Image (spheres, helix red, strand yellow):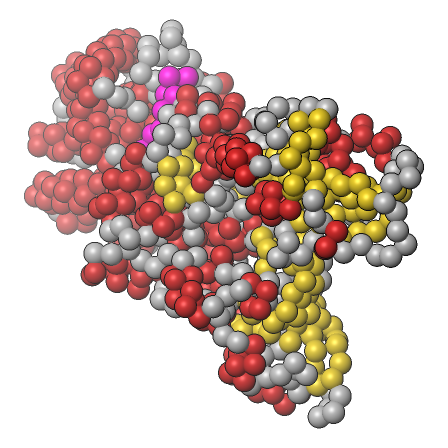
Amino acid sequence: MMNRSNQAATAKATGKAAPAHPTVAAAQEAFRENDALLAQLDTSLAGLNEEQITDRLDRDGVNEVSHEKPPHWTFQLLRAFKNPFIIVLLILAVVQVFVTPDDLSGPIIIAVMVAISVFLSFSQEYRSSRAAEKLKAMVRNTATVTRRASDEHSERIEVPVGELVVGDIVHLAAGDMVPADLRLLTAKDLFISQAILTGESLPVEKAGPAQAHVVESGAHGAQQGNPLDLPTVCYMGTNVVSGTATAVVAATGGRTYLGSLARSIVGERVQTSFDRGVSSVSWLLIRFMLVMVPIVFLIQFYKHGFLDALMFALSVAVGLTPEMLPLIVTANLAKGAIAMSNRKVVVKRLNAIQNFGAMDVLCTDKTGTLTLDKIVLERHLDLDGEDSEDALEYGYLNSHFQTGLKNLMDKAVLAHRDLEPIVSRYRVVDEIPFDFQRRRMSVVLANGNGHHLIVCKGAVEEMLAIATKERRGDEVVPMTDERRREIKAMTRHLNEDGLRVLVVAIKEETPRSGPYGVADEAELTAVGCLAFLDPPKDTAATAISALHHHGVEVKVITGDNEAVTRKICREVGLDVEHSAQGRDIEPLDDAALDELVKRTTVFAKMSPLQKARVVKSLQRQGHTVGFLGDGINDAPALREADVGISVDTATDIAKESADIILLEKNLMVLEEGVIEGRITFGNIIKYIKMTASSNFGNVLSMVMASFFLPFLPMLPLQVLVLNLLYDISQLSIPFDRMDPEYLRKPRKWDASDIGRFMVWIGPTSSIFDMTTFALLWWVFGANSDVHQSLFQSGWFIESLLTQTLVVHMIRTRKIPFLQSVAAAPVLGLTTAIIVIGMIIPYTAIGTKIGMVQVPDIYYAWLAATVLAYCALTQVVKLIYIKRYGRWL
């Protein structure tokens, strides 16, 4: 099997789509005669001996699929350092240590920031991965096989599934899990639930080659279709609903259908919307630093020499770098993860929180997400399509008295417990079991009136073929070919509405002592129909409406059939005008697929790799895609999506592939997750925009001051303290609220907007830095070396106040304090930092870093400066919003 990158490369080179299905070894053997197949696999009905088993285990390995193991904690810790800004900060710290080994205050501050960020990121992801691992079911499965104890003697034994080898003879019974990919040799009444692979809630019939009437001429065509449709092959991971079978193992481990899927999703994950966004913003800010720092160094080198210039340039580099970015981003994501955990959601990967908010398309499986994953009896009808109690009562008797394992439809009929009293009027006499050819089953009952009553229930075609009469009202009339056509047309309409239909018929017989058989299922009187459906959840329509309200389009991608899917989608409020099946998208190249995906809401009969192709198509069109699924067939799409969502009852592979695991299949949690993601993203963008613009403004002011000041406008250590205080004030940002208007539509990273924002807002603060410079230079006499400490102290206070207050200006597009008030933690911490900044010049710490007290009258000038700055920033904000249509 090709891996995903090879498939993609092949598709790109040929202009055709990647294969829709993994290579399936068992499918290659689907149409071979039993004797030829056993000879090909070098086995027999007597089973394998110990030597053969050992050789094949050595050759093929144990019967296990690839699983993505959580990385060791040391690797997770190292991965937390993989951030452009953390790397830049560490480089700056190392340079400072070498340049000024006697003063380690700067490197220590940087190290503390990096340590907190790394610890937060590591601890959250480590806890989440541990929680996800605990969700996996730890079950040891066994299989019943025939093996040779000696040349003359074979026996049936139970062996661990992992020890199965190709050629083993396996026996299946109701309730068994299929332990490997099997080719059936013989089967009786075998129904397999393939929901784990296909998403179809109803079990499918399987049979041996003789029963399935498969001929060689049809083999090629069948193999070109979905291998899961092959009637003679059972796939690893599925389970037996009813019946028995004997089969030979055709593939184990990685060569199984399940193993191929598992192998295709293990390895490096694709970059998500969050990863691409952080990278683009990081490199934008680093480019600003690479331009500004050399300019500052050259100016200061000309005036003050190499060492002072280098130290000041390093301080500017730290000032330009939003050193708290990794910490603020991680803290925001961790807070979002904690909020989601309170809603019974495990966040495996922190980045998924922001991707949740940015998601504008949610692709979801149908079974168990939109539906209850439970078959219900939707309607009971007469043969004219009107409600009929007779059809329900006779169907109930048939389901109640049959002795075999009751299937999902029988259980749905028996859910009508109000009919239990009618059971007491009958006793069971005999039973004619279901089989693959007849597609029906009958019970024979004694009804107390001296007759035996045959009650038969089965597929429409087969039942109408043996019914010679029909009940119409209170009359019994002959069944004509015309009526058969009318009844088939009526049931077809039910099928188009997504309903699975069975016909119920009866016949009275004179009692006899001998057994009843298939021959007695003749000249029946058709009574009516039972129509079944996997109904939508009560919350599905509400959840989809809520997602639409928040700008998230919902598409359904399922392995189930199209009619059923369209019916469910209509009921939950989705547009089903355009739908497509897997066979429709299989021959399309990427361009044609993109056009189809753009207009299509419902995708049915989709293979796992076709689901992943649709996700990638949406991503090519600029969408941030979420995928909700719980089956093995969903795993590739879960891994490709920007945010993969699964549930705790999902298969292990689905949970491994997912970023978020819901502990309850509640769609309303998705809306809460979207809102939480947007709050998280909004607070991250707040920090980036306010910090990047403030830092850019400060550095711009430093560059301008360097042209005319005979001394440094601020000492390197003062710059570090200023940044530290400002950064501490930002620690409250993750606890801030967002304006309701911001949460109404998806938000994405836009590095160009951040760069534009810096250029607009940064120079606004520089204007007032210049007025402060002029004030300190000419009004307060800081135009001499004696008063340079006064200049530095005055600008330190003004810079801290404007930087801190701009938090409130930038956090909302509204008027701060009047139309939008920050959360209490933001108000409290920014106020505290302003007070601390104004007190520092009067303390020993201020003296140590070269600061002095400023005259009292300076604060009056400062108040006017700050008010003017806030007013101008508000004006610039309104102009910016009007011009670009956005703020955050």
Residue lying at 65% horizontally and 81% vertically, measured from the top left = 45
Q: Range of the magenta residues?
A: 738-748
Q: Quadrant of the C terminus?
A: top left
Q: Is residue 690 above or below residue 35?
A: above
**Image location of residue 490, percent across then percent down:** 53, 32
Residue lying at 37% horizontally and 56% vertically, measured from the top left = 20
374 horizontally vs 654: left or right:
right
- As drawn, which residue projects farthest toward the bottom? 151
**Image location of residue 341, percent across then percent down:** 58, 36
Q: Is residue 735 magenta?
A: no
Relative to the observer, which residue lies in front, 134 or 859? Answer: 134
Q: Quadrant of residue 38?
A: bottom right
590 horizontally vs 534: left or right:
left
Residue lying at 68% horizontally and 62% vertically, measured from the top left = 188
Q: Is residue 682 above or below residue 643?
A: above
- As drawn, which residue projects farthest toward the top? 818
Relative to the observer, which residue lies in front, 184 or 574? Answer: 184
